[in-house]
Image (spheres, rainbow, N blue to C red):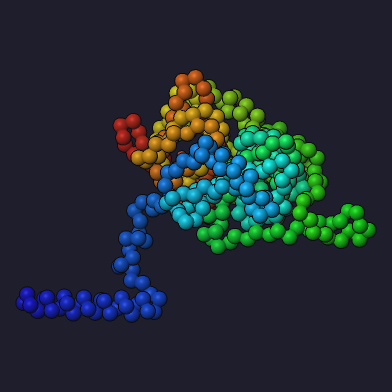
Amino acid sequence: MATSDATSNMERGAARSELSQDAAALNLMEFWEERAALELLQPRQSADPCLWRWKDIEPRLHRAAEIVPLEEAERRALLFSNPGLAPRPFMTNTIFGAYSLYNPGEHAPVHRHTPSASRMLLEGEGAYTTVEGEKCTMHRGDLILTPNGTWHDHGNDGDGPIIWMDVLDLPLVENLNSTVFEFDYFEEDAQSNTREPVQRTTQSVVHPDDHSQNLYSGGGYKPLFIDRERGAKGDHSPMFVYRADQTREQLDRLRNYDGSPYDGIIIEFCDPTTGASVMPTLSYTAQLLRPGEHTRAHRHTANAVYCVMEGSGYTQIGDTRLDWSRNDAFCAPAWMWHEHVNRSSTDDAVLYSVTDVPTLKKLGLYREECRMDDGEEVLVTK
Ligand SMILES: [Fe+2]
Ligand SMILES: [Fe+2]
């Protein structure tokens, strides 16, 4: 009996091996071999918690500014490359981030692309981004949007170098195989009689200074004489600039509220006409961690990237503690427990962050859990 069982086991093994080879040759895979990788009980952990320090990045950007001409680089940036996602230069599965430096007088030609992009100025004066004919000047902590399909060019009108953080949903768009960049920009030639379209590398400025602020920074009011849709798509904020001083004032105004147990005093940059996220794919937030504040741990299926605008502290992400200070960048990948701490007993800490929450919510994939004081894990949002 035992011999017969062994024989039938051997025969079955040989038959299965033959089936596997046949299937592979026919571009088929056996579900029972793949099941564990397909039917996950928890979201897969691929990106790592990771910190990029300003003190490491800044000198290398200045070195690049000496030896890499902008004409060659087009955009002189150091890209944040998460080791868990190597060799792709991505911060998380859905979010791309970089720091870029422009020397005085440098200009990146006008272009547009399907990934939605943004900039937050970190250092220097004189930076600008022209978006759909609005020249947006940039000061430290300002958020500038260049959503999917909006023409934009960048530059530095100042006397010294400027550095900003770029954030794009490029990995998400790339995974949907929908990345398209366009560099052939045409506009009517106002000088000619024919007004024939001519190709340009810089957009003509057609809106007044502070156009976005004039239209939308009132809060609670929207102009009815303006079409809210700007750019090729209408599913993003029509306000392309969010000013740092207004953001900071709003955080201060709310500082005596309890705030979020997970994020302190947190506010979202939103479409002022609808209250929706500024991009269809990404949500941008600013959060104030008051002196000594230590938030409760939570985790969510959203990925988050952070930029430290003020102060110093640390974020515990799973088993990894990331100690951050001014101008550092870091990421909290999806479904990892994380909590934030402002280490100072006297000074505020302010973090800007970008998440893919809007994408996940639209697809019904957002899920969040928190950890109570007794260690119990509680489902917050499903
Ligand atoms: Fe761009
Ligand atoms: Fe979070």
Across and down, in percent, residue 60 comes to: 56, 43
Side (left or right) of 266 relative to 4: right
Residue occupying image coordinates x 59% and y 24%: 253
Q: Residue lying at the far left in this picture: please name it.
A: 1
Q: Quadrant of residue 352?
A: top right
- In the displayed structure, does residue 325 sit left or right of residue 46? right
Regarding residue 28, the answer to whether it shows in the image is yes
The residue that appears at 30% across and 67% down in the rendered structure is 33
| Residue lying at the far top of the rendered structure | 346
Establish if 313 lies above or below 157.
Answer: above
Between 237 and 157, the one lying in front of the other is: 157
- Asked whether residue 382 appears in the rendered view, the answer is no
At 46% from the left and 49% from the top, the residue drawn is: 82
Q: How many labels does the image show?
A: 0
Residue at x-position 69% and y-position 36%: 160
Q: Which is more toward the observer, 300 or 223?
A: 300
Q: Which of 113 and 321 is in front in this view?
A: 321
- Location of residue 212 in the rendering, given as x and y in whole percent from the top left corner: 73, 39
Percent of width and height locating residue 371: 36, 36
**Which quadrant would the N terminus be assigned to in this image?**
bottom left
| Furthest-right residue in this view | 193
Q: Residue furthest front?
A: 67
Q: In which quarter of the image is residue 176?
A: bottom right
